Amino acid sequence: MLFEMLLNVYALLFQAMLVIVLLFFVLKQNKSERTKRKDKSLYYIAKWNSSEHINAELKIILHNYSEEMNSDRLINGLNENDEYIYHVIFLLNFFEEMSIAIDNNLTDEMMLIKNFGSTFNRIYEKSEKIVYFLRKIRGNDNLYRNLEKMYGKWSFKYMLSDSKRYS
């Protein structure tokens, strides 16, 4: 009887040790995934801080071209290698790539929101007409959909954070 009790205790201890080892590996794997997401986020931050991205951002923010935009003007701009349109498409492609990475859980979204949030929203709002006309010209209604989805999500998060700040 005592021997059976000791066997049961050892069996329970062995099972508990297996659970602890399994938890250790799961937690280590989760930490590794978080580290990968943070590294990918830092990649986008470093890429953004290149002079080409900063120059493009400044040209878009300082220019009111999008207010005058229509499909003919965009087609002409694309054909004539218009610098402003090039910069808009360059940044839209950057944010589209980043939004796909976020959507696939390859980045730390909160880290990217803190770094890009207001800049991204401002750039998207300035280039929304261009996105609309690019979809028409290219006949692709799904062009920049991930980016558009991210804009909706991030705008909502900013709206919530502003309401908390002022209440």
Image (cartoon, rainbow, N blue to C red):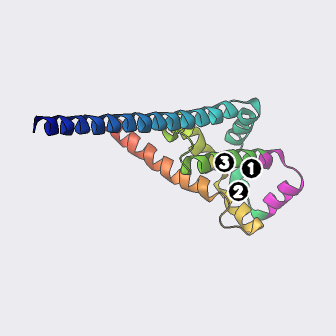
Is the stretch drawn in magenta largely helix, strand or loop? helix
Q: Is residue 54 left or right of residue 25?
A: right
Q: For mark 1, what is the residue?
A: 89
Mark closer to the chain start, 2 or 1: 1
Which residues, given as a range, are shown in magenta?
72-86
Q: Which label is found at residue 130?
A: 2
Q: What is the spatial separation of the Cα atoms under label 2 and label 1, in whole angstroms?
A: 9 Å
User: Could you tell me if the residues under marks 3 and 1 are in contact, i.e. CB atoms within 8 Å?
Assistant: no
Q: Secondary structure at mark 2?
A: helix
Depicted 13 relative to depicted 104: above or below: above
Instruction: Tell me the kind of residue under disc 2.
Output: Ile
Residue 125 falls within the magenta-colored stretch = no
Write down the quadrant of residue 164 in the picture.
top left
Residue 160 shown left or right of residue 103 in the figure: left
Which residue is more in the foreground, 135 or 37?
37
Q: Are marks 2 and 1 in contact (CB under 8 Å)?
A: yes
Mark 1 Cα-neighbour bin, 10 Å: few <14, some 14–19, many ≥20? some
Residue, far right: 80
